[in-house]
Amino acid sequence: MKELLLALSLLVSCLTQSVLSQQLQTFALRGRVVVARTGEPIAKVRIIANAADQSTTTDDNGDFTLHNIPAGQVDLYITTVNYGLVKKTITLTAGENELFLIALNEDAAALTEKVTITADPYETGETNAASEQTLNKRELQTLASVLLGDPVRAAQALPGVTANDDFRSEFAIRSAGFDRIGLYLDDVLTDNFVHTVQGGFPDTGSLSVVNADTVSSVSLMSGAFPLKYGDRTAAILDVRSRDGNRVKPTGRVAASLSGLSGILDGPFADDRGSYLFAARKSYVGYLVRRINDTNQFTNNPPVLGFADVQGKALYDLSERNQAGVSVIYGAFNYDRNRDRNLLGVNNVFRGDSRNLLLNGHWTFTRDTRFFWQTRVFGLRTSFKNVNGQENTLDDGKRTQFGGRSDVNFQVNGSHRIEAGLYIRSLRVDTFSRRFDFGAGTFTVTGFNRKGTEQGYYAQDTWSNERTGLSLTGGVRLEHSGATSETLFSPRASFSWAMTDAWRIRAAVGRYYQFPDFEQMYGRLGNPGLRAEGSTHYNASIERLFGDRIRLLAEVYDREDKNIFFSLSEPRIVGNRVTFAEFPFRNALSGHARGVELTLQRRSANKLAGWISYAYSRSELADVGTGLSFVSDTDQRHTVNVYGSYRFTETWNLSGAWRYGSGQPIPGFFRQVGSGYFLSSNRNRARLPYYSRADLRLSKAFLFRKWKLTVTGEVINAMNRNNVRYAGFDGFGFDGRVFGQLDRVLPILPSAGLVLEF
């Protein structure tokens, strides 16, 4: 018995010493950090080993090594400025450990364990898109601005975009206004889905209802866009919201001089889905109101306030089926606050608007060759505007609901079939009142109308990997119940990768846009309006230099016909001033032609960004009156520059510069010295050139389990005196114009901080 006890004691002692020896043994932990979306290695990334209290930084190849790490589980915290904070748990064993691959997401709050390897950083999201410019998440974050976080404003820096009004999110592309650009949010065509004073008041502003923190990508298709998008004649802005992460619950809180925002996302308990919730609230209105009241200002700036919330949930019903739902709600308030006695009877003293979007989808993925998605959606915008005497100027609701279904089927190695339908029901119930100056009378207009729109498309893409050729042909069929029209839209596109460095693209397509109910039944409405149309011709050539740099040249021609126009502006006719107004007509035909050049580098390391130049000319003619003029958003020369440089793991500098040679002052004006007079020619006077440079410097403070990023931003850093046309005050009998152009943002410094955990 004594011998047995002694043997057991020796055995326990040996096992204990072996375990202690193994626990005291240390190893080297080697890994590589890459971009989750592209697989590109990232340099200057901080790696913190929580248990060993060690840290290091990745080299130029994205590699790192941590020495003297104890065996067992190790918690790593990985991050760098402008990228998300990632926690990864790794188990080290006594054997030789592999090179651990860590995916770092561009989004500040979206985690992933998946890595997508793609050799092309400029890969387009649509099949054979003729002209597609995109913003990835990192570009979006730096361009959306600390003050507002607006993804639509971020798109203003894209090549070819013209945007000279700092107070508005809307922009123009290729001499076409925003009313001809389709804003799609998760495949839903939105109408007036912005924080703004509804009713078309040019002296106000606008802001996207969508929070930039919830967006994964923004794509602008400027010409001959794919057939899945309809009811617009100029371009498409495609905004995609991001999913919640499926790794662990994460949060992000941001505070700036203008407001607060927060986002929370994570996986469901059974790991079969994810959730996301975001909210933001502006307190600029509160600050401006207090300043105005304290100082007894008379002609003070208006008070603006907004708040919005957004939620999204995805759930995997099975390996092939997924269901999802998202909701966005936003409220906006506009208040002149103290200067009501200085306003005209038709100026807005106070305005309110509410926006709601519900979007549900079901996705069936049979295999890698077959994908089918169906959506149902509903949108509502309600608004009310009053003047200084508390009289209602506008009161209304805009509602739409419908569904779409899209199928993508890879038939064989060469052919890919895409088809779908989009059906929506529209209803507008509105009341509008305008007062006659000095007469004490007013004019009331209003209507309650509804109608349906249907769109069906199908296309086939043939590709040959050996030759690099890809051809797409298809048709779209659209019907409007309001105009009783059925319209046929063909499209064809061509892409040829001649070598690894050279690619050419070309496309032609026909597009239609149905009139808005306001144009048919509003104050200057014409129920006889029909759809306007355009034919797009687009060609481009792309040259790659290495893996990350490209030079892109595009030429385009857009032929417009039956464009909506109402001759309702003050003008000189026969040496006399006239204010005669006419209803909307399908009056205008013409074209927009130009060239766009872009030099771009897209990389997670060193300098990234672009330099672009666009030249555009437009011409429109009213066949009925013989009147000819350039478009309201015609701008001959446009330069957009953006750059970002992450020079350490905690410091990042970015900047943007936008230049425009000046858009027309819409209407019949001529400039004499510093003053303006009415004219018999339209769109001859132009705004001064626009130039705005913005700078942004971010500093990240990296801790074990959380990160703090502080950002300083200067808008219009050169304090350029840019102006906009927001309407003149009045006109004399000699045609002299009273009033002046409004200055937009002066130099405006701001700061913000973001806490991630």
Image: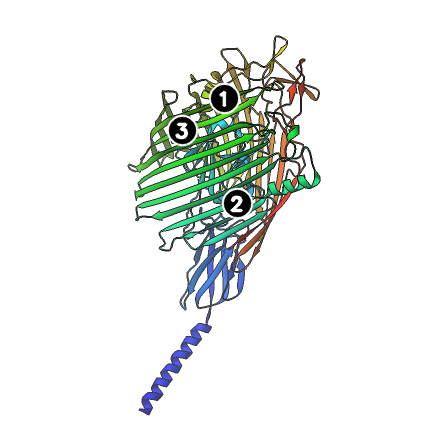
Spot occupied by residue 380 in the image (x, y as percentages of width and height)? 44, 34
Spot occupied by residue 156 in the image (x, y as percentages of width and height)? 54, 34
Mark 1 or mark 2, whichever is nearer to me: 1
* First reached walking from the N terminus: tag 1 or tag 3: 3
Q: Do we see residue 555 in this rendering?
A: no
* First reached walking from the N terminus: tag 1 or tag 2: 2
Q: Which label was assigned to residue 426? A: 3
In this picture, is 157 found above or below 454? below
Spot occupied by residue 368 in the image (x, y as percentages of width and height)? 32, 43
Q: Which label was assigned to residue 280? A: 2
Residue closest to the eye, 514 or 42: 514
What kind of residue is marked 3?
Leu
Q: Do we see residue 275 in this rendering?
A: yes
Left/right placement of residue 410 relative to residue 606 reads: left
Mark 1 or mark 3, whichever is nearer to me: 1
Contact, CB < 8 Å: mark 1 with mark 3?
Answer: no
In this picture, is 293 found above or below 43? above
Farthest residue toward the bottom? 2
Q: Which residue in the structure is indicated by mark 1?
A: 445
The span from disc 3 to disc 2 (Cα, nearest Å) is 29 Å
Residue closest to the eye, 35 or 686: 686
Residue in view at x 63 percent, y 36 percent: 337
What kind of residue is marked 1?
Thr
Q: Secondary structure at mark 2?
A: strand
Residue closest to the eye, 230 or 203: 203
Placement of the N terminus among the 4 image quadrants: bottom left
* First reached walking from the N terminus: tag 3 or tag 2: 2
Residue in view at x 46 percent, y 60 percent: 30
The 10 Å Cα crowd at callout 2, few under 14, some 14 to 19, many 20 or more, is many
Spot occupied by residue 396 in the image (x, y as percentages of width and height)? 48, 29
The colour scheme used here is rainbow
Q: Which label was assigned to residue 623? A: none
